[in-house]
Amino acid sequence: MENSRFTIKNKFSISLNSLGYFLLSYLFVYLLHQFVTCLTANIFNIPTILSYNEVSFLADKSRWTYASVQTIFLSGPIATLFCGIFFLIIAYRFHDFDGLLRLFFLWGALHSFNLFFGALIIGAFTGQGMGFALNWMYLMDSAKLVIVILAILCMMVIGAMHSRMFLFTANSYFAELRKDRKSEFLRLQLFYPFIFGSLLLYFIKIPVTMTDLLLPITLLFLIVPIFSRQQHFPSLTFNEETPHSIKSDPLVIIITIFVVIVFRIIFAKGISF
């Protein structure tokens, strides 16, 4: 990979493309989580309102039983867990392809696992979301601590599994990724989109719930191992005779802006279930 291709314009294009897939995949996984939660609540005759930042449950205390609490507050996270596994399989299967669409599945897998393991960690401390299910299990603090530690370990292992696949997304732009350029590429493809994407999600979902406020922090348990493990890989040479041009994908940018606006408008007043 030539140093001349690491211009400011090219760096911006790489991060902007990844940012688009970061936001699109998050909204997909987030809505999957919320729709499953609302539909499950419907099974227990608990009306809900799905808005852009939360699910409101319209039920008195008599409606809440051990079965309803466990099923409702675990259904969304479990759905995202299976979604994450599916996305990870797809990303692995096509990791050596040179299309940018792989980023949707890679980011989607990270968001999915974070909405399960990350939400589990947050819930153990705040009592919100999955924390409601934990509280109804009457677990001791020591048991919750064990759950948190196991969740963190799982996230670190899963994050490490993503390292090679994120590095291979360089073949969308370069014919080679030298060992001394891997960290810089991951900053452009992974870290900067994570930072700016999280800030944009805060803005989109104002007022932000406690869970949404903390989820970017738990996402670091997936992202940090990706950076840590990249140093174990040598320079990567891809099966490309000539490197691709590096430019922002206008279609991804337009779709992302459109989806974000539609998401905010449709769910501004909430949808009743």
Image: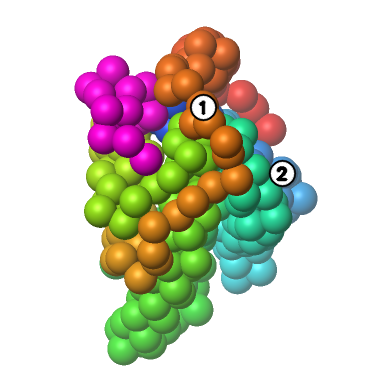
The residue tagged 2 is: 39
Residue 108: percent from left, percent from top:
55, 45
Query: Does residue 46 belong to the magenta stretch?
Result: no
- Span of residues in magenta: 1-15
The earlier-in-sequence mark between 1 and 2 is 2
Residue 127: percent from left, percent from top:
36, 63
Q: Amino acid at mark 2?
A: Leu
Front residue of 188 and 112: 188
Query: Does residue 5 belong to the magenta stretch?
Result: yes
Q: Is residue 234 above or below residue 5?
A: below
| Helix, strand or loop: magenta stretch | helix
Would residue 176 be seen by someone viewing this image from the given angle?
A: yes
- Residue at the image point whose x is 34% and y is 80% from the top: 149
The residue tagged 1 is: 244
- Residue at the image point whose x is 39% and y is 77% from the top: 153
Q: Amino acid at mark 1?
A: His
Q: Label 2 crowding class (10 Å Cα cut-off): few <14, some 14-19, many 20+? A: some
Residue 245: percent from left, percent from top:
47, 21
* 234 relative to 3 in the view: left or right: right
- Residue at the image point whose x is 57% and y is 36% from the top: 241
